[in-house]
Image (spheres, coloured by chain):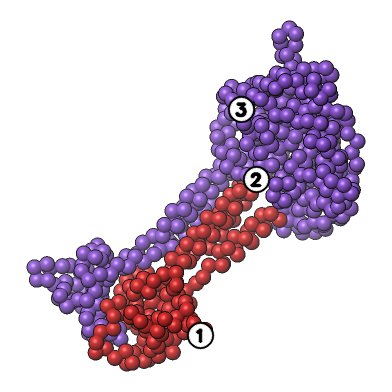
Amino acid sequence: MRMLAAAIAVWTVSCAHHLDRKLGPTLQTVDMTAPVLQAHMRDGSVYVLDHWTIDDRAQVIHGTGQKLGADRVPLAVAGPLEVRIPDVALFETNTIATSASVGAMAVITGVSAVVTAACIANPKACFGSCPTFYAPDDATGQPVLQAEGFSDAIAPALEKHDLDSLYRTTGHGGPFTLTVTNEAYETHVIKQADLLVVQRPPGGRVLATPEELWLASSVVPPAACTAAEGDCTEAVRALDGVERTSLTDDHDLAARETIDLRFDGDARALAGGRLGLAIGARQTLVTTFLMYQGLAYLGTRATEWLAKLERGDALASAGGRALRSLVGGIEVQLQGDDGAWHTVDEIYETGPLATDVHLALLPEGARAGHVRLRLPKGGWRIDHVALATLTGPATPVRISPDAIHGALGAEYAGGRRVATAFPIVTLPGDRYELHYTLPPGDDYELVLDSRGYYLEWMRDAWLREENPLAALAMFLDPARAMRELAPAYKKLEPTAEKLFWSSRYAHP
Amino acid sequence: MRTRSLAMALVLALAACASNPDPRDPATFEQMQRQAFGGWIEIVTASGAADTGELLAVRHDEVIILDAMNFVQRFPIAQIARARLWKWRRDGSYGLWGTLGGLSTISHGIFLVFTLPIWIATSSIASGVESSAQHVDIPDATWDELVPWSRFPQGIPDGVDIGKFLGRGGPPGAQ
């Protein structure tokens, strides 16, 4: 990498010049500082002079060089020359200038070098995925990232299924293609990728909890959204990539913040159904950072720890659960008669890339004029919130792919075959297209039901941070770890966030 | 696959830039400060005839070149459909820079998905700008803009028998 950077630097200073040619009948019209002067004579000959000086009084130019004939054959041996200014038809200078494009390239080189340096210094900020699923966006028809499959399942023992709403896609009867990729240093084992297909209610949507789908006759954004920074109504009004987020606490990654939502009227009274809160959100990089920091602390013992997880070791399991709890989801709170705010449901989905729309169920009979969200400070990016009037559970049609076509990433393709059926095991760079046939009809809600697990690849940089005691402390006292790691993440946070915000890649 | 496609896009974009077809010995920018030949011009007439050579002079009604066979050719301006005058030969392209920069994004992990496209866009645009900077095109430009790049920007002086240039319009290195 250093050699690459050096090569770029060398190239930076050694290329892309322009020739700035100035031509005119007087010396004032050319570049008086140019090292070489050409004097075009009326007879077609030309003087080419180095080290030229002007004798104004004598109206003569002195220099060393050659006089060339009209056919550009030298008329004499090179040496000191004197040219009478009145005899010159045109003066010419050529100045070598560095191309302005070098500036633009230098800027991107600098930015890229900063990213490279940051990633070398903090690999935990630069890698991380899980299977990423792309589905065509209604607005553009182009595939956009809409789901990260089973992102909590970092070991075979943690294999799970995961419902992800493909909220930006409307299904129609006929062929449908989903693309799944492996874009990280991970091994993905995908055992299932079914589509749950439900006809949308007129004017409504179908929303997903972690285990079931609900029909919503209406989905209404809040009339007002207020957080610590002020008004956030516009940010959460629609699933449009404009997100509300915040920075982590200086001293504790587990510190919480609240967001207050006000909804006009009472949707339940209008529609007569149960209420739910649809939340379109994705995590910031905090979870990725913590997970990779944990693996870095474990270092060469990471596999031992994963094996403990496999065996159901209490400490490993409890530590993982405690960390997960501290990282925290988005709690939905309603105000009780006592004036206190009570959590009635919580949504959680690991992953900093895909915005997933989750349904939080409000208790039967709950009124929802005022709803509060409680979440880890700097832990989530919320794109959309809406109050949903639910008319009942949905009964989806489950559809499995009827064809699987894939391509292996070149770097790790050796000795492997493209899978044509589940389980699909992918390595970095692999890409598969899953082909489905949707039933005849229109206006379908599509929800991905994926199942599997994945394995992080250890990286050399992590092994340098091996610290079994710190790892043990992280699992024994996660709350303390969240406090102790806060400054480290804080240092990383501005760069990581800026890079994510500057990209549309991860914006569904 | 996405990365490979982007890398291929980078290579194709950078390879798409035109290069100077001047067959004469290539002059460095330092040599060009001292050489006194005209730039290399490609001419296509309205009838489809094409010729290339050193631009000797641009007159109000005709363009005179010393063609690749060292014959002087005159083209009435009214009959020229298009022309391209090559001012210099790039002393480097952004291809290697862009390629190395693109490769460096391998170290960016997941951020590669946007740093690589930035590299592709920037180096492609820079390459395009550099490529177009080395030539002047007719009819996009006026013939007056080609005059400074002719051997005789002052016009062909009376008494100069350009016919004698036959066989003498050698490469810049001959001077």
Q: Where is residue A436 in the image (x, y as percent from the top left)?
A: 86, 51
Residue A480 appears anywhere in the view: no
Measure how far apart labels 2 and 1 are at the Cα level. 51 Å
As displayed, is residue A248 above or below residue A460? above
Left or right placement of residue B33 versus residue A138 in this view = left
Neighbour tally class for label 2: few under 14, some 14-19, many 20 plus, Cα within 10 Å: some
Chain assignment, label 1:
B
Question: Dividing the image into 4 quarters, which one contains the C terminus of chain A?
Answer: top right
Neighbour tally class for label 1: few under 14, some 14-19, many 20 plus, Cα within 10 Å: few
Q: Where is residue A448 in the image (x, y as percent from the top left)?
A: 82, 41
Measure how far apart labels 3 and 2 are at the Cα level. 23 Å
Q: Nearer the viewer, residue B121 or A265?
A: A265
Q: Which residue lies furthest to the front in this view?
A: A270
Q: What element carries label 3?
A: loop
As displayed, is residue A8 above or below residue A503? below
Q: Name the residue under label 2.
A: A505
